[in-house]
Image (spheres, helix red, strand yellow):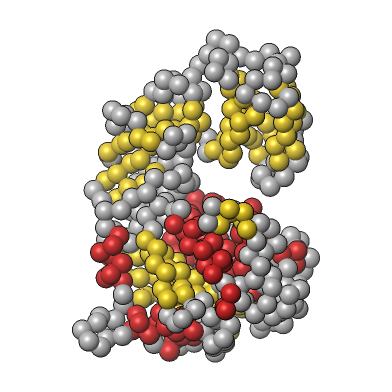
């Protein structure tokens, strides 16, 4: 099965803006609580989502009527670089969404992170919009990296009626008849219900979670690796090893084929699972998103460790007049993020933009490509806005940042964090403009406000 994916993947690179990382800790730090919250409320149908070019509600994910949820997942994964998407139809209505990130060094060595996306009724935020959202977030982060080994991001259908989607995939992967070769799957992490902790959401507490494992192939080794990662990096989590672990979720279908697999999820072992299991009361308001974020970080760290990062530095240093790639031994191509186009002739390590905007560099070494974050760059101008023309307040800000546009000319507003990464961009002619800062983490931000003739950058502190 993996060999077919390899043939369709080679030579494909998609340009899109993503964050960067050079170490496992950097990658852990990229997991976004805000991203997870948005995905959960969209998948559970508690908020509209852009699907197939229009705003729609995922009314439910019941296996007989969950095509819209499948489209949502496919579109989100297809937007990330370095992934090949395969919709695997295994019966008349069931379909798995499979995204493959090919390893550059050992493409046949495979690690899988997975979750089921079907449900038994409406909403079902914890079961299992949480697991699906975590897989999407991990794919978003790791797809921007060059890796030694292959990662498969898998979203299974029909888990709720007998683990059908995962069963089909595992059987296909293990099939050695008619000249087929058994896929070399070295580890499977199944994320099923990762959002409920009995303490009040967001508060400190026990933060217990289960690692369900049995002695199949190297499954106990995966458990040990997760425990080592917990001891190597900082997580607000308390592991409960359950052996023999449950067979009531998708990882068990890989055990049946003698593959290494574990389940990571909230602690049923300590009776700390959602009280709204398999009911329409399973809503996003009951999710402890900080707890969910910690579990997502843990699995991200495991997948990054096993994937093996290839050393490329896709960070950028900015001065008043230049942008420079921090990788000293690569090939370079600079991009204009605003037009999503490469800049002709801009192939040196350093680039000096001639106009204000957002820029990124693609660094490459052989077949390995990585793209930097987009960095906002302002060409120095002798004219800045006066306080009578543009006013930004309050500073510090806690929830809403206000901009008074007293010149009532179209403004281009770009928000960058302290590292230079773009957080958001806006265009507005309104005399009064508000920006939601509630979901931004505390810290320093830079708000650049520009017209065709003037530009000013404001340092804003988010409390």
Q: Identify the residue at image location x=62%, y=23%.
A: 410
**Left or right: 214 with respect to 423?**
left
Query: Could you tell me how many numbered marks the image carries?
Result: 0
Outermost top residue: 382
278 up-or-down from 425: above or below: below
Q: Identify the residue at image location x=31%, y=85%.
A: 175
In depth, the one of 363 and 56 nearer the eye is 56
347 up-or-down from 233: above or below: above
Q: Which part of the image, by quadrant, shows the C terminus?
A: top right
Q: Identify the residue at image location x=71%, y=41%.
A: 436
Relative image position of residue 383 (x, y in whole percent): 58, 11
Relative image position of residue 86 (x, y in whole percent): 39, 67
4 up-or-down from 358: above or below: below
Relative image position of residue 168 (x, y in whole percent): 42, 83
Outermost right residue: 200
**Left or right: 40 with respect to 308?**
right
In depth, the one of 198 and 358 nearer the eye is 358
Q: Which part of the image, by quadrant, shows the N terminus?
A: bottom left
State whether residue 223 appears in this view: no
Q: Identify the residue at image location x=56%, y=66%.
A: 68
Outermost left residue: 179
In depth, the one of 438 and 425 nearer the eye is 425
State whether residue 51 appears in this view: yes
**Left or right: 182 with respect to 165?**
left
């Amino acid at each position: 099965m993996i060999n077919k994916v390899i043939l369709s993947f080679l030579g494909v690179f998609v340009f899109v803006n993503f964050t960067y990382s050079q170490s496992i800790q950097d990658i852990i730090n990229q997991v976004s609580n805000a991203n997870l919250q948005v995905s959960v409320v969209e998948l559970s149908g508690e908020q509209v989502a852009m699907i197939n070019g229009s705003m729609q509600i995922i009314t439910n994910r019941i296996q007989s009527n969950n095509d819209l949820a499948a489209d949502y997942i496919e579109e989100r994964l297809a937007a990330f670089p370095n992934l090949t998407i395969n919709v695997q139809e295994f019966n008349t209505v069931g379909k798995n969404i499979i995204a493959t990130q090919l390893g550059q060094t050992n493409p046949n060595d495979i690690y899988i992170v997975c979750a089921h996306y079907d449900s038994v009724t409406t909403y079902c935020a914890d079961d299992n919009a949480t697991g699906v959202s975590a897989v999407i977030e991990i794919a978003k982060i790791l797809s921007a990296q060059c890796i030694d080994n292959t990662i498969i991001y898998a979203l299974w259908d029909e888990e709720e009626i007998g683990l059908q989607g995962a069963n089909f995939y595992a059987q296909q992967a293990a099939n050695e008849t008619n000249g087929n070769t058994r896929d070399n799957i070295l580890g499977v992490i199944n994320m099923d219900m990762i959002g409920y902790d009995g303490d009040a959401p967001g508060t400190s507490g026990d933060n217990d979670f289960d690692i369900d494992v049995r002695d199949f192939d190297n499954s106990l080794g995966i458990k040990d690796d997760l425990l080592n990662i917990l001891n190597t990096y900082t997580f607000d989590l308390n592991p409960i090893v359950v052996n023999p672990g449950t067979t009531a979720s998708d990882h068990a279908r890989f055990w049946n084929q003698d593959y290494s697999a574990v389940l990571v999820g909230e602690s049923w072992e300590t009776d700390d699972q959602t009280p709204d299991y398999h009911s329409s009361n399973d809503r996003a308001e009951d999710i402890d998103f900080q707890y969910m974020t910690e579990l997502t970080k843990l699995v991200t760290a495991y997948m990054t460790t096993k994937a093996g990062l290839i050393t490329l530095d896709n960070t950028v240093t900015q001065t008043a007049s230049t942008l420079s790639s921090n990788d000293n031994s690569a090939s370079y191509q600079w991009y204009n993020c605003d037009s999503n186009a490469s800049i002709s002739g801009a192939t040196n390590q350093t680039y000096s933009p001639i106009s204000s905007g957002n820029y990124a560099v693609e660094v490459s070494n052989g077949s390995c490509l990585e793209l930097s974050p987009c960095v906002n760059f302002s060409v120095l101008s002798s004219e800045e806005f006066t306080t009578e023309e543009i006013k930004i307040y309050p500073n510090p800000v806690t929830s809403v940042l206000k901009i008074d546009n007293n010149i009532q000319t179209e403004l281009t507003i770009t928000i960058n964090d302290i590292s230079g990464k773009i957080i958001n961009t806006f265009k507005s002619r309104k005399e009064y403009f508000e920006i939601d800062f509630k979901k931004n983490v505390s810290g320093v931000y830079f708000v650049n406000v520009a017209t065709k003739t003037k530009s000013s950058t404001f340092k804003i502190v988010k409390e």
